């Protein structure tokens, strides 16, 4: 008997043992309720979208059991037909509106709906707040969501939730550095859709039958989900280690007027706090503001009301004023509210109702000593926690009740 023939039974035994091990691990993970599915699928209009009917635990930041409804929204089931006694508010945004970090009833738009109902926002009318937020969306994907998805539900009010620290970046191919999403660009003075991502190699690969099958397997195998989460945890740990290693350099870096240098030192998202002085950032702001006006025009043409809400970023609402000042000193800026004030100025010029949350949330955080962003050992960073969502939802509801739309 040759050596190859002698090895075959041993190899088969090893593979059989591995298979039995995987099956046992799969059953064990299912028995404990372990579930980390992927919630996103490719979308030929918006780049990606939530998978209808997907559900499972989300623990990358905070913890919540997430269910996506049959229409692909992180929301409860909604009917497209609106009752005659109902006022509908459609919330469009990114991961802050998607709100995977908290249970659905703690999301700001759910808090907002409850507060508006309790305070009789419009007497005799039932209030419904529908969520269309998807993580990773910039204003381009949000405008396309409005045109393609939102009008099916006949909203009376469209609320654009602006995440100032990354929406401007997300609207620029040069800053976002991905070809897998749609952009708008100015050509001959007009905003034009650039959906070339649809023919990119990466997007076509994600749309292939093999990729779809791979996603299905991963979404239904707890064992593969565990491996994927372990890989994510390792990458996060490595990134945290690199961040600590570079922190002393960033803190000692001298102030530079060139935005690309600041971007390298302090992170692209943080550059939004300063006046743009290079062509890429100037264009990113121009496109962002143009998309807001395009959304305003689309909403007005449909006979609905449009309002912009600027949310908060972690550094803006740290409860300790000294911590906020230290961040400003390190970044070399004078105003933490530069992006909020810039968008407010646009809205005033263009007669768009606007709610600027960050100053109000900062005042609350300082008075109460509460962190509105972050979870566990990472308080002050990342997305809103349950307190942040609650304060934001109640503040938006109050501003609407006070007549921000001029009703």
Image (tube, rainbow, N blue to C red):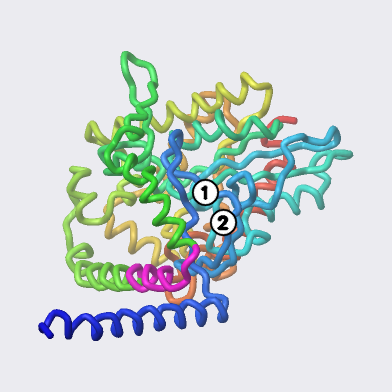
As displayed, is residue 149 above or below residue 28?
A: above
- Residue 234 visible, this orientation: yes
Q: Is residue 221 magenta?
A: yes
With 140 as the anchor, is 127 left or right in this view? right
Q: Quadrant of the C terminus?
A: top right
Dot 2 falls on a residue whose secondary structure is: loop
Mark linked to residue 54: 2
Q: Give the quarter of the figure containing the N terminus.
A: bottom left
Magenta range is 220-232
- x and y percent of residue 371 in the render? 51, 67
The residue at 52%/70% (across/down) is 35
Q: Observer-nearest residue: 255 or 355?
A: 355
Q: Which quarter of the picture shows residue 54?
A: bottom right
User: Does any portion of residue 359 appear in the rendered image?
Assistant: no
Q: Which mark is residue 50?
A: 1
Do tag 1 and tag 2 residues touch (Cβ < 8 Å)?
yes
Percent x, y of residue 129: 69, 45
Q: Residue at x 32, y 30 (%)?
A: 196
Of badges 1 and 2, nearer the viewer stands: 2
Residue at the far right in the pictured view: 124
Main SS of residues in magenta: helix
Q: State the CA–CA distance, disc 1 to disc 2.
A: 8 Å
Q: Is residue 169 magenta?
A: no
Dot 2 crowding, Cα within 10 Å, few <14, some 14–19, many 20+: some
Secondary structure of residue under mark 1: strand
**Please, is residue 110 above or below residue 355 in the view?**
below
């Amino acid at each position: 008997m040759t050596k190859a023939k002698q090895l075959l039974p041993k190899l088969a035994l090893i593979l059989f043992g591995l298979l039995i091990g995987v099956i046992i691990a799969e059953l064990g993970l299912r028995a404990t309720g372990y579930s980390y599915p992927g919630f996103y699928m490719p979308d030929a209009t918006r780049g990606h979208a939530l998978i209808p009917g997907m559900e499972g635990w989300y623990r990358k930041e905070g913890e919540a059991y997430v269910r996506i409804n049959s229409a692909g929204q992180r929301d409860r089931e909604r009917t497209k037909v609106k009752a005659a006694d109902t006022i509908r508010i459609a919330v469009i945004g990114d991961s802050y509106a998607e709100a995977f970090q908290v249970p659905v009833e703690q999301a700001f738009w759910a808090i907002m709906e409850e507060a508006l109902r309790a305070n009789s926002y419009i007497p005799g009318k039932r209030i419904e707040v529908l969520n269309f937020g998807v993580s990773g969306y910039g204003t381009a994907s949000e405008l396309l969501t409005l045109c393609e998805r939102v009008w099916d539900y006949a909203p009376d009010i469209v609320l654009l939730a602006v995440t100032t620290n990354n929406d401007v970046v997300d609207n620029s191919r040069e800053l976002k550095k991905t070809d897998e999403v749609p952009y708008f660009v100015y050509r001959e003075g007009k905003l034009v859709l650039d959906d070339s991502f649809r023919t990119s190699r990466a997007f076509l690969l994600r749309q292939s039958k093999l990729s779809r099958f791979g996603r299905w397997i991963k979404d239904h195998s707890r064992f593969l989900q565990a491996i994927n989460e372990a890989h994510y945890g390792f990458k996060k740990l490595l990134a945290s280690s690199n961040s600590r290693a570079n922190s002393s350099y960033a803190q000692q870096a001298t102030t530079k007027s060139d935005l690309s240098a600041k971007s390298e030192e302090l992170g692209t998202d943080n550059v939004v706090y300063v006046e743009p002085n290079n062509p890429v950032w100037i264009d990113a702001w121009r496109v962002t503001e143009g998309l807001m006006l395009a959304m305003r025009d689309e909403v007005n043409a449909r006979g609905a009301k449009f309002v912009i809400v600027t949310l908060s970023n972690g550094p803006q609402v740290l409860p300790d004023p000294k911590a906020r000042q230290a961040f400003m000193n390190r970044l070399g800026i004078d105003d933490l509210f530069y992006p909020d004030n810039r968008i407010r100025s646009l809205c005033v010029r263009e007669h768009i109702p606007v709610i600027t949350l960050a100053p109000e949330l900062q005042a609350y955080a300082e008075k109460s000593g509460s962190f509105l962003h972050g979870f566990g050992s990472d308080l002050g960073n990342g997305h809103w926690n349950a307190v942040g969502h609650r304060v934001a939802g109640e503040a938006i509801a109050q501003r609407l009740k006070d007549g921000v739309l001029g009703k």
